[in-house]
Image (cartoon, helix red, strand yellow):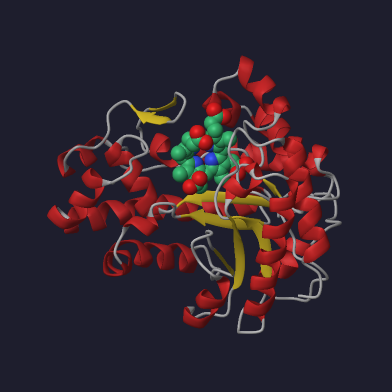
Amino acid sequence: MNDDFPPLRNDLLLRAARGEHIDRAPVWVMRQAGRYLPEFRKVREDHEFFEVCRTPELATEVTLQPIRRYTGLVDAAIIFCDILVIPQALGMEVLMNPGPTFTSPLETPADVAKLSEKVDVDEELGYVFEALRMTRQKLEGQVPLIGFCGAPWTLMAYMIEGGASKTLQKSKTWLFKYPEESRALLKRISGICVDFLVGQVKAGAQLLQVFDSNAGDLSPHDFETFSAPTLRQISAAARCGYDTVGLDWTEDPRDVVATLDVDACLQGNLDPVVLYGGRDAIEREVKRMCEAFRSARGGVTRGWIANLGHGITPGVDPEDLRWFFECVHKYSTNL
Ligand SMILES: Cc1c2[nH]c(c1CCC(=O)O)Cc1[nH]c(c(CCC(=O)O)c1C)Cc1[nH]c(c(CCC(=O)O)c1C)Cc1[nH]c(c(C)c1CCC(=O)O)C2
Protein backbone atom coordinates (compact mmCIF):
# COMPACT_ATOMS: atom_id res chain seq x y z
CA MET A 1 0.00 0.00 0.00
CA ASN A 2 2.58 2.56 1.11
CA ASP A 3 5.59 0.97 -0.48
CA ASP A 4 6.35 0.35 -4.08
CA PHE A 5 6.33 -3.44 -4.16
CA PRO A 6 7.27 -5.59 -7.16
CA PRO A 7 4.20 -6.50 -9.28
CA LEU A 8 2.41 -9.74 -8.43
CA ARG A 9 3.00 -12.51 -10.97
CA ASN A 10 0.74 -15.23 -9.50
CA ASP A 11 -2.64 -13.98 -8.30
CA LEU A 12 -4.48 -17.34 -8.24
CA LEU A 13 -5.06 -17.10 -4.48
CA LEU A 14 -6.53 -13.60 -4.66
CA ARG A 15 -8.70 -14.52 -7.62
CA ALA A 16 -10.04 -17.60 -5.82
CA ALA A 17 -10.81 -15.57 -2.69
CA ARG A 18 -12.69 -13.01 -4.78
CA GLY A 19 -14.64 -15.74 -6.56
CA GLU A 20 -13.10 -15.05 -9.95
CA HIS A 21 -12.30 -17.67 -12.57
CA ILE A 22 -9.28 -19.90 -11.88
CA ASP A 23 -7.75 -22.66 -14.01
CA ARG A 24 -6.81 -24.73 -10.97
CA ALA A 25 -7.05 -24.36 -7.20
CA PRO A 26 -4.32 -22.27 -5.58
CA VAL A 27 -2.53 -24.21 -2.84
CA TRP A 28 -0.49 -23.49 0.30
CA VAL A 29 -0.25 -25.26 3.67
CA MET A 30 -0.65 -23.96 7.19
CA ARG A 31 2.74 -23.91 9.02
CA GLN A 32 4.51 -24.32 5.69
CA ALA A 33 7.46 -22.55 7.30
CA GLY A 34 7.98 -25.08 10.07
CA ARG A 35 9.91 -27.85 11.66
CA TYR A 36 9.41 -30.43 8.90
CA LEU A 37 11.90 -28.35 6.86
CA PRO A 38 15.60 -28.98 7.63
CA GLU A 39 16.43 -25.37 6.64
CA PHE A 40 13.91 -24.14 9.27
CA ARG A 41 15.36 -26.41 11.97
CA LYS A 42 18.79 -25.00 11.11
CA VAL A 43 17.62 -21.42 11.82
CA ARG A 44 15.92 -22.59 15.03
CA GLU A 45 19.18 -24.17 16.27
CA ASP A 46 20.56 -20.68 16.84
CA HIS A 47 17.40 -18.66 17.45
CA GLU A 48 14.53 -19.05 19.86
CA PHE A 49 11.00 -19.14 18.32
CA PHE A 50 9.87 -15.61 19.27
CA GLU A 51 13.31 -14.24 18.43
CA VAL A 52 12.66 -15.41 14.85
CA CYS A 53 9.25 -13.67 14.92
CA ARG A 54 10.75 -10.44 16.28
CA THR A 55 13.73 -10.23 13.93
CA PRO A 56 12.44 -9.12 10.51
CA GLU A 57 15.46 -10.59 8.66
CA LEU A 58 14.91 -14.01 10.26
CA ALA A 59 11.11 -13.93 9.88
CA THR A 60 11.57 -13.01 6.21
CA GLU A 61 14.11 -15.78 5.69
CA VAL A 62 11.89 -18.55 7.11
CA THR A 63 8.78 -17.20 5.37
CA LEU A 64 10.65 -17.54 2.06
CA GLN A 65 12.04 -21.05 2.72
CA PRO A 66 9.00 -22.99 1.45
CA ILE A 67 8.63 -20.57 -1.48
CA ARG A 68 12.21 -21.30 -2.55
CA ARG A 69 11.93 -25.04 -2.08
CA TYR A 70 8.56 -25.32 -3.83
CA THR A 71 8.94 -22.62 -6.49
CA GLY A 72 6.10 -22.83 -8.98
CA LEU A 73 4.18 -25.29 -6.80
CA VAL A 74 3.06 -23.23 -3.82
CA ASP A 75 0.76 -20.25 -4.44
CA ALA A 76 1.10 -18.18 -1.25
CA ALA A 77 3.52 -17.13 1.45
CA ILE A 78 2.29 -16.61 5.04
CA ILE A 79 4.24 -14.27 7.25
CA PHE A 80 6.18 -16.11 9.95
CA CYS A 81 4.74 -15.12 13.31
CA ASP A 82 2.35 -16.59 15.87
CA ILE A 83 -1.17 -15.84 17.08
CA LEU A 84 0.19 -15.41 20.62
CA VAL A 85 1.97 -12.13 19.84
CA ILE A 86 -1.30 -10.34 20.79
CA PRO A 87 -1.28 -11.66 24.38
CA GLN A 88 2.40 -10.61 24.46
CA ALA A 89 1.43 -7.12 23.27
CA LEU A 90 -1.08 -7.04 26.17
CA GLY A 91 1.84 -7.58 28.53
CA MET A 92 1.70 -11.35 29.08
CA GLU A 93 4.88 -13.42 28.96
CA VAL A 94 4.67 -16.36 26.52
CA LEU A 95 7.46 -18.86 25.97
CA MET A 96 7.67 -21.63 23.35
CA ASN A 97 9.09 -24.75 25.01
CA PRO A 98 8.25 -26.61 22.79
CA GLY A 99 4.53 -25.69 22.88
CA PRO A 100 3.30 -22.27 24.05
CA THR A 101 3.51 -21.62 27.81
CA PHE A 102 2.26 -18.51 29.65
CA THR A 103 4.22 -17.73 32.82
CA SER A 104 1.16 -16.14 34.55
CA PRO A 105 -2.14 -17.04 32.90
CA LEU A 106 -5.33 -15.16 33.82
CA GLU A 107 -7.00 -16.89 36.75
CA THR A 108 -9.93 -14.61 37.59
CA PRO A 109 -11.38 -11.47 35.97
CA ALA A 110 -9.42 -9.43 38.54
CA ASP A 111 -6.25 -10.44 36.66
CA VAL A 112 -7.46 -8.59 33.56
CA ALA A 113 -6.45 -5.37 35.33
CA LYS A 114 -2.83 -6.50 34.96
CA LEU A 115 -3.03 -6.30 31.16
CA SER A 116 -1.84 -3.16 29.39
CA GLU A 117 -4.72 -0.73 29.16
CA LYS A 118 -3.89 0.63 25.72
CA VAL A 119 -1.98 -1.31 23.11
CA ASP A 120 -0.18 0.68 20.44
CA VAL A 121 0.27 -1.96 17.74
CA ASP A 122 2.94 0.05 15.93
CA GLU A 123 5.00 0.06 19.08
CA GLU A 124 4.30 -3.50 20.27
CA LEU A 125 3.95 -5.34 16.97
CA GLY A 126 5.84 -3.07 14.58
CA TYR A 127 8.32 -5.92 14.04
CA VAL A 128 5.56 -7.86 12.25
CA PHE A 129 4.88 -4.90 9.96
CA GLU A 130 8.58 -4.58 9.25
CA ALA A 131 8.81 -8.32 8.44
CA LEU A 132 5.84 -8.00 6.07
CA ARG A 133 7.43 -5.09 4.21
CA MET A 134 10.74 -6.89 3.92
CA THR A 135 9.09 -10.13 2.79
CA ARG A 136 6.99 -8.34 0.14
CA GLN A 137 10.19 -6.88 -1.30
CA LYS A 138 12.10 -10.16 -1.23
CA LEU A 139 9.19 -12.17 -2.66
CA GLU A 140 9.58 -10.19 -5.89
CA GLY A 141 5.92 -10.74 -6.69
CA GLN A 142 6.23 -14.53 -6.97
CA VAL A 143 3.15 -15.20 -4.81
CA PRO A 144 0.83 -13.14 -2.57
CA LEU A 145 1.67 -12.66 1.12
CA ILE A 146 -0.88 -13.66 3.78
CA GLY A 147 -1.10 -11.84 7.13
CA PHE A 148 -3.01 -13.26 10.10
CA CYS A 149 -4.06 -13.02 13.72
CA GLY A 150 -5.72 -15.25 16.29
CA ALA A 151 -9.45 -14.84 16.87
CA PRO A 152 -10.43 -13.33 20.24
CA TRP A 153 -11.97 -16.50 21.68
CA THR A 154 -8.92 -18.61 20.77
CA LEU A 155 -6.58 -15.99 22.26
CA MET A 156 -8.68 -15.63 25.41
CA ALA A 157 -8.62 -19.42 25.84
CA TYR A 158 -4.79 -19.46 25.59
CA MET A 159 -4.53 -16.54 28.02
CA ILE A 160 -6.58 -18.42 30.62
CA GLU A 161 -5.38 -21.99 30.02
CA GLY A 162 -1.76 -20.83 29.86
CA GLY A 163 -1.07 -23.11 26.89
CA ALA A 164 -2.72 -25.72 24.72
CA SER A 165 -5.53 -27.61 26.48
CA LYS A 166 -7.61 -30.62 25.49
CA THR A 167 -10.73 -29.66 27.42
CA LEU A 168 -10.51 -25.84 27.71
CA GLN A 169 -12.16 -26.31 31.08
CA LYS A 170 -10.74 -23.15 32.67
CA SER A 171 -11.49 -20.82 29.77
CA LYS A 172 -14.96 -22.24 29.16
CA THR A 173 -15.68 -21.91 32.87
CA TRP A 174 -15.15 -18.15 32.45
CA LEU A 175 -17.86 -18.06 29.77
CA PHE A 176 -20.38 -19.70 32.11
CA LYS A 177 -19.29 -18.11 35.40
CA TYR A 178 -18.25 -14.63 34.24
CA PRO A 179 -20.12 -14.00 30.95
CA GLU A 180 -19.99 -10.18 31.19
CA GLU A 181 -16.30 -10.05 32.03
CA SER A 182 -15.62 -12.58 29.27
CA ARG A 183 -17.44 -10.45 26.73
CA ALA A 184 -15.50 -7.37 27.84
CA LEU A 185 -12.19 -9.21 27.49
CA LEU A 186 -13.17 -10.56 24.06
CA LYS A 187 -14.09 -7.07 22.94
CA ARG A 188 -10.80 -5.70 24.09
CA ILE A 189 -8.88 -8.37 22.22
CA SER A 190 -11.02 -7.71 19.10
CA GLY A 191 -9.95 -4.07 19.07
CA ILE A 192 -6.29 -5.08 19.00
CA CYS A 193 -6.99 -7.66 16.27
CA VAL A 194 -8.51 -4.89 14.11
CA ASP A 195 -5.55 -2.52 14.56
CA PHE A 196 -3.13 -5.37 13.97
CA LEU A 197 -4.85 -6.59 10.78
CA VAL A 198 -5.22 -3.10 9.32
CA GLY A 199 -1.54 -2.46 10.08
CA GLN A 200 -0.63 -5.70 8.31
CA VAL A 201 -2.49 -4.67 5.15
CA LYS A 202 -0.77 -1.27 5.23
CA ALA A 203 2.57 -3.05 5.59
CA GLY A 204 1.95 -5.29 2.58
CA ALA A 205 -0.29 -8.26 3.50
CA GLN A 206 -2.48 -9.11 0.50
CA LEU A 207 -4.91 -11.49 2.20
CA LEU A 208 -5.74 -11.93 5.90
CA GLN A 209 -6.62 -15.04 7.87
CA VAL A 210 -8.23 -15.06 11.35
CA PHE A 211 -7.51 -18.31 13.21
CA ASP A 212 -10.28 -19.39 15.58
CA SER A 213 -8.69 -22.74 16.31
CA ASN A 214 -10.67 -23.25 19.51
CA ALA A 215 -14.07 -22.42 18.02
CA GLY A 216 -14.90 -26.11 17.62
CA ASP A 217 -14.89 -26.59 21.40
CA LEU A 218 -17.89 -24.32 21.88
CA SER A 219 -21.49 -25.40 21.44
CA PRO A 220 -23.19 -23.66 18.50
CA HIS A 221 -25.01 -21.44 21.00
CA ASP A 222 -21.85 -20.43 22.84
CA PHE A 223 -20.00 -19.85 19.58
CA GLU A 224 -22.84 -17.55 18.49
CA THR A 225 -22.90 -15.79 21.88
CA PHE A 226 -19.18 -15.27 22.46
CA SER A 227 -17.03 -15.81 19.38
CA ALA A 228 -19.15 -14.92 16.34
CA PRO A 229 -19.88 -11.31 17.43
CA THR A 230 -16.12 -10.67 17.70
CA LEU A 231 -15.47 -12.19 14.27
CA ARG A 232 -18.16 -9.95 12.78
CA GLN A 233 -16.79 -6.93 14.61
CA ILE A 234 -13.30 -7.60 13.27
CA SER A 235 -14.50 -8.13 9.73
CA ALA A 236 -16.65 -4.99 9.78
CA ALA A 237 -14.02 -2.78 11.40
CA ALA A 238 -11.19 -4.04 9.20
CA ARG A 239 -13.51 -2.98 6.37
CA CYS A 240 -13.84 -6.24 4.48
CA GLY A 241 -16.18 -9.18 4.86
CA TYR A 242 -14.77 -12.70 5.01
CA ASP A 243 -14.28 -13.88 1.43
CA THR A 244 -13.03 -17.28 2.45
CA VAL A 245 -13.97 -19.83 5.11
CA GLY A 246 -11.43 -22.49 6.16
CA LEU A 247 -12.57 -26.06 6.83
CA ASP A 248 -10.88 -28.96 8.54
CA TRP A 249 -11.16 -32.57 7.40
CA THR A 250 -14.13 -33.38 9.65
CA GLU A 251 -16.35 -31.39 7.30
CA ASP A 252 -17.57 -32.36 3.85
CA PRO A 253 -17.52 -29.22 1.67
CA ARG A 254 -20.83 -30.27 0.11
CA ASP A 255 -22.52 -30.15 3.53
CA VAL A 256 -20.87 -26.82 4.35
CA VAL A 257 -22.12 -25.26 1.12
CA ALA A 258 -25.61 -26.42 1.98
CA THR A 259 -25.55 -24.63 5.36
CA LEU A 260 -23.37 -21.55 4.75
CA ASP A 261 -25.41 -18.36 4.63
CA VAL A 262 -22.76 -16.43 2.65
CA ASP A 263 -21.40 -17.18 -0.78
CA ALA A 264 -17.80 -17.62 0.31
CA CYS A 265 -14.69 -19.17 -1.14
CA LEU A 266 -13.73 -22.32 0.82
CA GLN A 267 -10.23 -23.27 2.00
CA GLY A 268 -9.01 -26.70 3.09
CA ASN A 269 -9.20 -29.48 4.05
CA LEU A 270 -6.93 -32.51 3.78
CA ASP A 271 -6.26 -34.32 7.06
CA PRO A 272 -2.54 -33.49 7.67
CA VAL A 273 -1.97 -37.10 8.76
CA VAL A 274 -2.54 -38.18 5.14
CA LEU A 275 0.96 -36.78 4.49
CA TYR A 276 2.35 -39.73 6.49
CA GLY A 277 0.45 -42.27 4.40
CA GLY A 278 2.81 -42.49 1.42
CA ARG A 279 2.49 -41.25 -2.16
CA ASP A 280 -0.40 -43.50 -3.21
CA ALA A 281 -2.52 -42.42 -0.24
CA ILE A 282 -1.68 -38.75 -0.80
CA GLU A 283 -2.67 -38.97 -4.46
CA ARG A 284 -5.88 -40.88 -3.70
CA GLU A 285 -6.96 -38.49 -0.92
CA VAL A 286 -6.07 -35.32 -2.87
CA LYS A 287 -8.12 -36.66 -5.77
CA ARG A 288 -11.03 -37.34 -3.42
CA MET A 289 -10.71 -33.84 -1.91
CA CYS A 290 -10.67 -32.25 -5.38
CA GLU A 291 -13.80 -34.13 -6.35
CA ALA A 292 -15.59 -33.11 -3.15
CA PHE A 293 -14.78 -29.41 -3.68
CA ARG A 294 -15.57 -29.65 -7.38
CA SER A 295 -19.06 -30.91 -6.62
CA ALA A 296 -19.46 -28.43 -3.74
CA ARG A 297 -18.73 -25.67 -6.24
CA GLY A 298 -21.75 -26.86 -8.17
CA GLY A 299 -23.62 -25.45 -5.15
CA VAL A 300 -23.12 -21.83 -4.16
CA THR A 301 -19.41 -21.64 -3.29
CA ARG A 302 -17.43 -19.08 -5.25
CA GLY A 303 -14.01 -20.63 -5.19
CA TRP A 304 -11.63 -23.03 -3.48
CA ILE A 305 -8.14 -22.69 -2.04
CA ALA A 306 -6.56 -26.10 -1.54
CA ASN A 307 -4.84 -26.56 1.82
CA LEU A 308 -4.54 -28.94 4.73
CA GLY A 309 -7.31 -28.86 7.32
CA HIS A 310 -4.71 -27.94 9.99
CA GLY A 311 -0.99 -27.17 10.27
CA ILE A 312 1.63 -29.50 8.80
CA THR A 313 3.41 -31.52 11.49
CA PRO A 314 7.17 -31.87 12.10
CA GLY A 315 7.63 -35.49 10.91
CA VAL A 316 6.45 -35.01 7.32
CA ASP A 317 9.00 -35.71 4.54
CA PRO A 318 9.31 -32.46 2.53
CA GLU A 319 9.31 -34.53 -0.67
CA ASP A 320 5.89 -35.93 0.28
CA LEU A 321 4.64 -32.36 0.65
CA ARG A 322 6.01 -31.66 -2.83
CA TRP A 323 3.97 -34.62 -4.07
CA PHE A 324 0.87 -33.16 -2.34
CA PHE A 325 1.39 -29.88 -4.25
CA GLU A 326 1.90 -31.76 -7.53
CA CYS A 327 -1.28 -33.78 -6.99
CA VAL A 328 -3.30 -30.61 -6.30
CA HIS A 329 -1.98 -29.10 -9.53
CA LYS A 330 -2.93 -32.27 -11.41
CA TYR A 331 -6.41 -32.95 -10.00
CA SER A 332 -7.85 -29.51 -9.23
CA THR A 333 -8.40 -28.35 -12.80
CA ASN A 334 -11.86 -27.83 -14.26
CA LEU A 335 -13.27 -26.37 -11.09
C1 LIG B 1 -3.27 -22.17 17.82
C2 LIG B 1 -2.20 -21.47 16.97
C3 LIG B 1 -0.89 -21.14 17.42
N1 LIG B 1 -0.23 -20.54 16.36
C4 LIG B 1 -1.06 -20.49 15.27
C5 LIG B 1 -2.32 -21.04 15.64
C6 LIG B 1 -3.54 -21.08 14.77
C7 LIG B 1 -3.52 -22.20 13.80
C8 LIG B 1 -3.58 -23.57 14.46
O1 LIG B 1 -4.61 -23.86 15.09
O2 LIG B 1 -2.61 -24.30 14.31
C9 LIG B 1 -0.79 -19.92 13.94
C10 LIG B 1 0.58 -19.97 13.41
N2 LIG B 1 1.74 -20.39 14.01
C11 LIG B 1 2.78 -20.26 13.13
C12 LIG B 1 2.30 -19.65 11.94
C13 LIG B 1 3.23 -19.15 10.85
C14 LIG B 1 2.88 -19.24 9.49
C15 LIG B 1 2.77 -20.63 8.87
O3 LIG B 1 1.65 -21.16 8.87
O4 LIG B 1 3.78 -21.10 8.30
C16 LIG B 1 0.92 -19.52 12.09
C17 LIG B 1 -0.11 -19.01 11.09
C18 LIG B 1 4.18 -20.63 13.35
C19 LIG B 1 4.47 -21.65 14.37
N3 LIG B 1 3.97 -21.70 15.64
C20 LIG B 1 4.54 -22.75 16.31
C21 LIG B 1 5.46 -23.41 15.44
C22 LIG B 1 6.36 -24.59 15.82
C23 LIG B 1 7.27 -24.19 16.92
C24 LIG B 1 8.75 -24.15 16.66
O5 LIG B 1 9.27 -23.72 15.62
O6 LIG B 1 9.45 -24.54 17.62
C25 LIG B 1 5.42 -22.73 14.22
C26 LIG B 1 6.25 -23.00 12.99
C27 LIG B 1 4.28 -23.07 17.74
C28 LIG B 1 2.90 -23.02 18.21
N4 LIG B 1 2.09 -21.91 18.20
C29 LIG B 1 0.85 -22.26 18.70
C30 LIG B 1 0.88 -23.62 19.07
C31 LIG B 1 -0.28 -24.40 19.67
C32 LIG B 1 2.17 -24.08 18.79
C33 LIG B 1 2.73 -25.44 19.06
C34 LIG B 1 2.27 -26.36 17.96
C35 LIG B 1 3.36 -27.21 17.45
O7 LIG B 1 4.22 -27.61 18.23
O8 LIG B 1 3.34 -27.48 16.23
C36 LIG B 1 -0.31 -21.33 18.78
- Residue 222 left/right relative to 315: left
Q: Nearer the viewer, residue 277 or 106?
A: 277
Residue at 57% x, 45% y is 311
In this picture, residue 202 sits left or right of residue 163:
right
Residue 137, image x, y percentages: 79, 42
Can residue 306 be seen here? The reply is yes
Q: Nearer the viewer, residue 130 or 305?
A: 305
Q: Is residue 273 left or right of residue 139?
A: left
Residue in the image at 75% along x and 35% along y? 65
Q: Residue furthest bottom?
A: 299
Please say if 35 is above or below 310.
above
Can you give x and y, in whole percent of width and height, for residue 153 in the image? 35, 53
Q: Quadrant of the N terminus?
A: bottom right
Locate residue 15, reporting x and y percent.
74, 69
Q: Where is residue 203 drawn, in percent x and y?
A: 65, 47
Q: Residue furthest left?
A: 177
